[in-house]
Image (cartoon, rainbow, N blue to C red):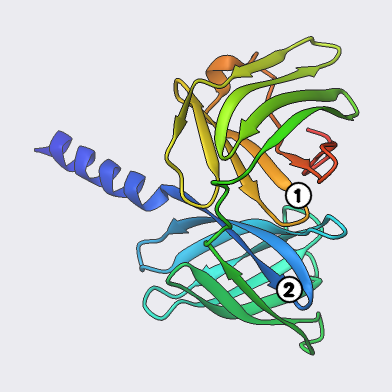
Amino acid sequence: MKLLCLILVSGVAFAQDKTETREMIGQLGNRSALLVLHSTRGADGATRLTGEYIVLPTLLRQFVDGESSPEIGVTTLREGATPILFGREPTGELRGTLRGGSFKGMRYGPGGQERERFEFSEEFSPMSSYSANVRCEARDGAYSSSLGYVADAGKLKSLEWRSVLTPSGHRCTVVAGEQRAFKGGLQFASGRCTVTLRDLGEYVRVAAANCSELCGSQAYLEPLLIDRRGACRLLRPEPR
């Protein structure tokens, strides 16, 4: 009986600690921005949120953390320039309502003054007519990445994505297999590994998930932004 209780308690704790990731596109004032939120639901029903937003015209990156109420979705997110905001003075705050696939409200300055309205949505533009022939490289410190893909009217013809870390030489190599049905973008799979393309307006973002089996122990695939000329840059260039 004791063992059964422990299993049940562990299962409840695991369910409470499960993290869900949501991606949203929208406007911060008159600037387009990408918002990524990681949510964990607590025992009281409130949702703990961490993540970041990136202002796309300038690629300014701000980290956020806060909570969302369980029923009406009232949400407050502190923002700052570093991933760890505890004990640091926030550079601003996003206050609004997060529900039904949207997050909208007002951004406030550090003194509580109103700065600009914001509105984000999980509805990304479809890419059913997307065509491109991309081959590019991006580097930041010890990390380098090369990406090549051909898409025609929303159909993938080929995709190969490689990264390498120096001086260890640890690498990732992903060659896309099947194309999956995916709302608001294009998604390709190679085993458990998925590569997702999303239209952000100024850029197409390419991101990988669950690809550790195709990487060396220290290697990873940093998301890339592809501009309209086919050049790429790292979405989040930073030391790891």
Q: Quadrant of the N terminus?
A: top left
Question: Nearest the camera: 74 or 222?
Answer: 222
Local crowd size for mark 2, using a 10 Å CA cut-off: few (<14), some (14–19), many (≥20): many
Question: Nearest the camera: 120 or 94?
Answer: 120
Kindly report which numbered mark, 2 or 1, lies closer to the viewer in this rendering. 1
Q: Could you tell me if residue 86 is visible in this image?
A: no
Place residue 5 in its image quadrant: top left
Q: Which residue is mark 2?
A: 28
**In this picture, is 105 found above or below 218?**
below
Q: Residue at position x 60%, y 69% from top? A: 120
Q: Which residue is mark 1?
A: 203
**Alpha carbon distance from label 2 to label 1:** 17 Å
Residue 168: percent from left, percent from top:
80, 11
Residue 181: percent from left, percent from top:
42, 40
Q: Residue at position x 49%, y 27% from top? A: 189
Q: Quadrant of the C terminus?
A: top right
